[in-house]
Image: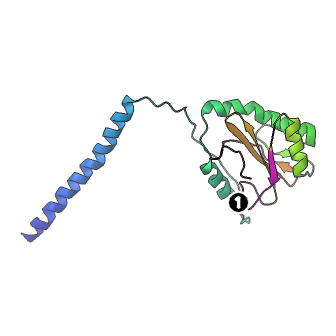
Amino acid sequence: MRAVRIGLPIAVLFVAASAAAVAVPLVRASVSASQPDERPAVAVEQFMCAQVASSVDGYCDRIAEDLGRRMPLADDDRVAAQPRRQALLDGFVRELGADCPAPLEHCRLPATTPDAVRQALIASGFTDPAVRPARYTDPAPAGAILYAVRVGRACLLGHVRSETAAPPLIVGRLPDESCLWP
């Protein structure tokens, strides 16, 4: 009899909690369905990162952390930035002597400096590019030159190192509206 007195309140509590777990999302869904969402459509951000097994600098983790800090981009903003990404790569070909086989492949280029990268970005029509050596907290491999430029609501973020340039990522702005932390 004692087991029934203890078990019954526990069973009632379990049923009540289960009912609430089902009812709350249903109520929220019906309220949000009646109010249209005014936010622009945002794409799901996915990326793949390959890191050399012997590397211990956490490059892929830093990219994921950086993407997590950025504001999401609407699909239209991402599409609008794609021609500017190609203009950036064309500028690297013209100004730095890069060889860029395809838009999403690494470019080969002679060894360069942050100032030469900055000048190539300016010559490609980007005003006020952020260019500097990558820090250990940046979304770039150790020893790289990190750069970022604004393109509408988006940013092009990339790096140059060891005579190669990675294609820039189209990313959202940071919370302070910049493309790269100072």
Residue 137 in view of the camera: yes
Q: Is residue 134 magenta?
A: yes
Q: Please name the residue shown 66% across and 49% down the image.
A: 48
Q: Is residue 24 left or right of residue 134?
A: left
Amino acid type indicated by mark 1 = Thr
Q: Please name the residue shown 92% across and 39% down the image.
A: 95
Quadrant, the N terminus: bottom left
Q: Is residue 56 left or right of residue 73?
A: right
Q: Residue 139: image x %, image y %?
A: 71, 54
Residue 138 higher or lower than 97, as above or below: below
Q: Exactly how many numbered labels are in the figure?
A: 1
- Based on the displayed image, in which of its 4 quarters is residue 73 positioned? top right
Q: Main secondary structure of the magenta part?
A: loop
Q: Please name the residue shown 43% across and 29% down the image.
A: 36
Residue 31 higher or lower than 45, as above or below: above
Residue 145 in view of the camera: no
Q: Please name the residue shown 20% across and 57% down the image.
A: 13
Residue 113 higher or lower than 136, as above or below: above
- Which region is colored magenta? 130-142
Q: Secondary structure at mark 1?
A: loop
Q: Is residue 18 left or right of residue 28?
A: left
Label 1 crowd bin: few (<14), some (14–19), many (20+), radius 10 Å: some
Residue underneath mark 1: 137
- Based on the displayed image, in which of its 4 quarters is residue 58 positioned? bottom right
Residue nearest the observer in this picture, 126 or 27: 126
Q: Residue 67: image x %, image y %?
A: 63, 49
Q: Is residue 146 magenta?
A: no
